[in-house]
Amino acid sequence: MQSRLYEVGWKFLDLVMPPRCGGCKRWGTRWCESCQEQVQFIGEESCPKCGNPNWDGIGIKCGRCCDTRLYYERLSSWVSFKGPIREAVHELKYRHNVGLGEKLAKNLVNLFESLNWDIDFIVPVPLGSKRFQERGYNQVMLLARPLAWDLDIPIKRKALTRIRETRSQVGLSREQRIANVQNAFTAKEHDVNGKSFLLVDDVVTTGATINACAKALKEAGAKKVFALTLARAVQPNSMEAF
């Protein structure tokens, strides 16, 4: 019911204030069919652990996974972070185009339903308080909320908290990314213990943030942690690229 009301509400707003596509800026829709057709899907021939699409198919996981302890069971992404989806994520994240969340989340619903993961709760990757105050919202929640409503799975928004402000991961090396988010998150044991979770984020590059979140959940007693992202900045199949 919530999902349907949310969708109808956005359709009404679209009639009152005609939107522009978050990918190509054409008038008439928040995300157009042309941009949807241009996205590059992350295929099934990806690493079964971290979702790396450059996996060579040798072994049970890719080289990037072998060099690092991963706290999540599996990470999967919808498309590569390029072309119209890159522009759309920037619109959602930096330009207050909040209506894009409802449109793009539909693709995460389809992806999740194809994976057969058994989870109890959905958790969006939390935003630092400073960035939240600057932005006024967490763009990941704009994806996680309609996803949860469509799947009829509760959100545990406060189960995971960012307890340390971190700098942007953009432009950082692998080591810098890991250090940047180390011990930046904590989870509440009474909300987490014995439960399985789906972490949701907008973009994954190296997976350092997702892994730090999963670590916090596991340390608080989470049974299993899976992760789903809208897009992935594709990295080479090497241990150095984690």
Image (cartoon, grey):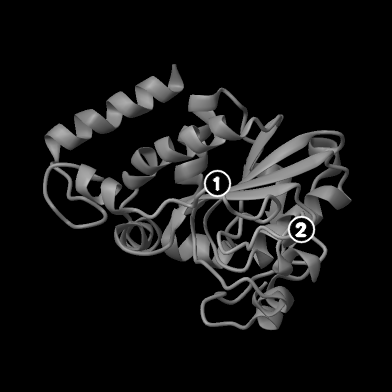
The residue identified by callout 1 is: 44
Left or right: residue 201 versus residue 142 is: right
Quarter of the rendering containing residue 172: bottom right
Q: CA distance from mark 2 to mark 1?
A: 16 Å
- SS assignment at label 2: loop
Which residue is painted at 44% across and 53% down in the image?
A: 79
Which residue is painted at 22% across and 42% down in the image?
A: 33
Residue 149 versus residue 89 in the image, above or below: above
Mark 1 residue type = Glu
Q: Nearer the viewer, residue 240 or 103?
A: 240
The location of residue 65, given as percent across then percent down, is 75, 64
Q: Quadrant of the N terminus?
A: top left
- SS assignment at label 1: loop
Given this view, does label 2 or label 1 mark the residue nearer the observer?
A: 2
The residue identified by callout 2 is: 59
Residue 144 versus residue 173 in the image, above or below: above
Q: Quadrant of the C terminus?
A: bottom right
Tag 2 and tag 1, C-beta contact below 8 Å: no
